[in-house]
Image: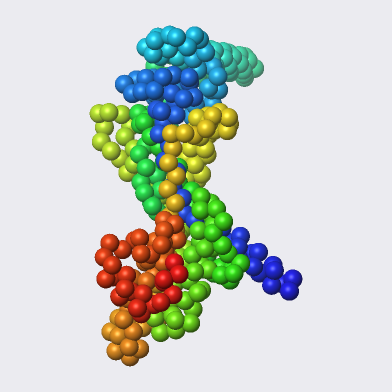
Amino acid sequence: PEQQRFAKAFRSMKLSSSIFGVCVVQLKPQLELLLNLPEKSLTKEIRLTQDLLSLFIDYQIPSDLLSYDGADDLDPLSKVEVVKGHVKKVFDMVDEMKDRDLKEEQQKADMRYEQQAMMSQHGAVLFGTAAPSAPKPMSFGSSIAFSAASPAFSAGASSVANDPFGSVPTASTEVCVNQEATTRANSPKDTQITNPSDITSIPKILDSKFEMFGDDERYGGAMKSTTIKASDKWTKKHQKNLLTKLEEKNMSSDDQRVERNKAFDLLDALSRSGDVPMSHSEFHVIIASTHCFDKSVVNTVVQDNVNPIEKIERSNLLVASQIHGVNIQALLSNADDFGRITKFCPMLNSF
């Protein structure tokens, strides 16, 4: 009995995670909520949106330093100007730190040059030879450019996302999360619809309904849960700037890990570590099931004397009724179709 309970619990956990999900986050509305700005105030602020994404992704600047915290009766344009001022101050601080780092590197280069020159002169005095010319010091002029842009990623399994992290970030991004699906479930009496909004219970519910037709499926194929996995090959489509063409590049495993971490960093910034709700987002759930036949279509009809179309119709109605939470009769616009289908499968009357 204990092993049986373990098997049921393990099966239940596997089915609860057999979901492929795609989360789509609208960046500009979420940024407006995060920065206490009115709705649609960032619609035409392309440069400001780029700067905000750069500060969040590349420099991990807290949103508290950039958000509007003044009077609520101020007009929307003035609130945006206040945020622009905060962004400018942060960028000025970043530029100041860059200049300081450049000066430190310049001093280090000068010190190395002086040390090498002194060592060369000392060697020439000892051996009576001419001192070799010392290397020229490194030049750190204003021509050195620091690019804070980083590319984005897109998944090749379910969809290809736009490039939200390139040198010209867009207004939306997609974060794709996939989990492995399995093919078995608990018995029908152990699985009941208790919370239709709980998407993790849908695979268990479907699997229990499939098992109710186990005897009838002897010559009519079998329904089972389908495993959905993301491909190991990911493709990045990005545009360096507005004047260049769209480029496509295959992402290695290291590149995928780096860009995935950047995506989660951006999510952490947009939600303020979970404090701000992601109200401007969509979560799409994909649950797949497969009706398998042991033989080909012709052999199923001729040798087994089974109509595969009726079996497929029954499977489609069964899945649709559980996903949408309605009875099968409500899914059919023609009453004759309901009578025809239930005539050869009376069990569907209970759904």
- The image shows residue 140, relative to residue 151, as above or below, that is above
Question: Hey, which residue is sitting farthest right in the picture?
Answer: 2
Q: Position of residue 57 (x, y in %)?
A: 49, 29
Rendered residue at 49%/9% (across/down): 71
Rendered residue at 31%/81% (across/down): 307
Quadrant for the C terminus, please.
bottom left
Out of 343 and 155, give the one closest to the viewer: 343
Rendered residue at 52%/13% (across/down): 69
Q: Position of residue 309 (x, y in %)?
A: 30, 75
Total marks drawn? 0
Q: Is residue 13 left or right of residue 47?
A: right
Display colour scheme: rainbow
Q: Is residue 341 visible?
A: yes
- The image shows residue 36, relative to residue 216, as above or below, that is above
Rendered residue at 34%/20% (across/down): 45
Out of 233 and 342, give the one closest to the viewer: 342
Q: Quadrant of residue 100?
A: top right
Q: Is residue 166 left or right of residue 105?
A: left
Q: Position of residue 350 (x, y in %)?
A: 45, 69
- The image shows residue 207, relative to residue 262, as above or below, that is below
Out of 324 and 26, give the one closest to the viewer: 324
Q: Quadrant of residue 144?
A: top left
